[in-house]
Amino acid sequence: MKVIIVDKEDNVIGSKERELVKQEDIYRVSSLWIMNSKNEFLLARRALSKTNDPGKWGPAVAGTIEEGETYGSNIIKEAEEELGLTDIKLTKGPKRFHKGKHNFFYQWFFLRIDKMIEEFSIQKDEVEEIKWISKTDLLKAIRKRPDEFLDGVAYCAQNFYF
C-alpha cells in the first residue's frame, strides 16, 4: 500500500510504501467520530497487533490515506471495513496537523447513529473493541489514564458536540 506524502500545507508531493515512511514525512489520516442520541461517543480500541499505538482508544474509525484516495473516500471505505457501516451521511469537521513521533494531517468527520455495540461488524485486525461512553466519563478516563488514549481524543470530546 502506498501512502500519500504531503508538504506542510497538505499539498501532495508523492507517495511511499507504508514501511518506507520516515519520521520527517507528513502523511494524511481520516477520522470518524460517532455519537448517538444519548450524546455518547463511540470509541474504538486499536488492535493490539497494530504497529502504531496498539491498544489505545481513539475515534470510532480512522485510516491512513492511500494513493488514489481523498480524506472523504478513505473514511467511507474505513467505516465499512472497520465497523460494517454503509450508506452513511457524514458531516465534515476540522482538519488539524499532528507533529510528533508521526507527522500527519487528520481530517475529522462526524456521524450521529443509534446502534447497539452488537450491531457493528468489527474488523478484528484493526479494532480490538468498541464502546459507547459519555463525555463526562470519557474526560474522567483521559485524566486518570491519558496514555490509554490517542492524541486528540480529549480535544474532540471537549470541543465537538455534533
Image (cartoon, rainbow, N blue to C red):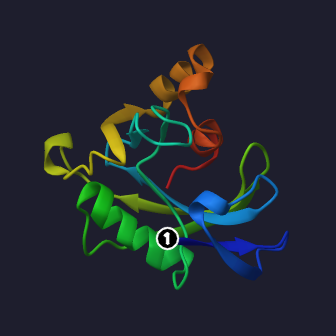
How many marks overall?
1
Is residue 84 shown above or below 137?
below
Instruction: Give amino acid for label 1.
Output: Met
Q: Is residue 18 visible?
A: yes
Q: Residue at x 75, y 63 (%)?
A: 26
Residue at figure coordinates x 47%, y 61% from the top left: 110
User: Where residue 112 sits: x, y (%)?
Assistant: 36, 58
Which residue sits at x=39%, y=72%?
A: 76
**145 with respect to 62 (left or right):** right
> Is residue 90 something one can see in this rendering?
no
| The furthest residue to the bottom | 68
Percent of width and height locating residue 82 = 31, 56
Work out which residue is located at the far left of the displayed protein and give it. Answer: 118
Q: Which residue in the structure is indicated by mark 1?
A: 1
Q: Residue at x 41, y 32 (%)?
A: 134
> Does dot 1 land on a helix, a strand or a loop?
loop
How packed mark 1 is, by other alpha carbons closer than 10 Å (few <14, some 14-19, many 20 or more), is few
Tell me: residue 66, above or below residue 98.
below
Asked whether 35 or 28 is in front, the reply is 28
From the top left corner, tell me how far across and down residue 27 is, in percent: 68, 65
Where does residue 47 sit, x and y in percent of width and height? 38, 39
Say which of 101 and 151 sits in front: 101
Would residue 86 appear left or right of 23 to someone viewing this image? left
- Furthest residue toward right: 8
Q: Is residue 140 left or right of residue 106?
A: left
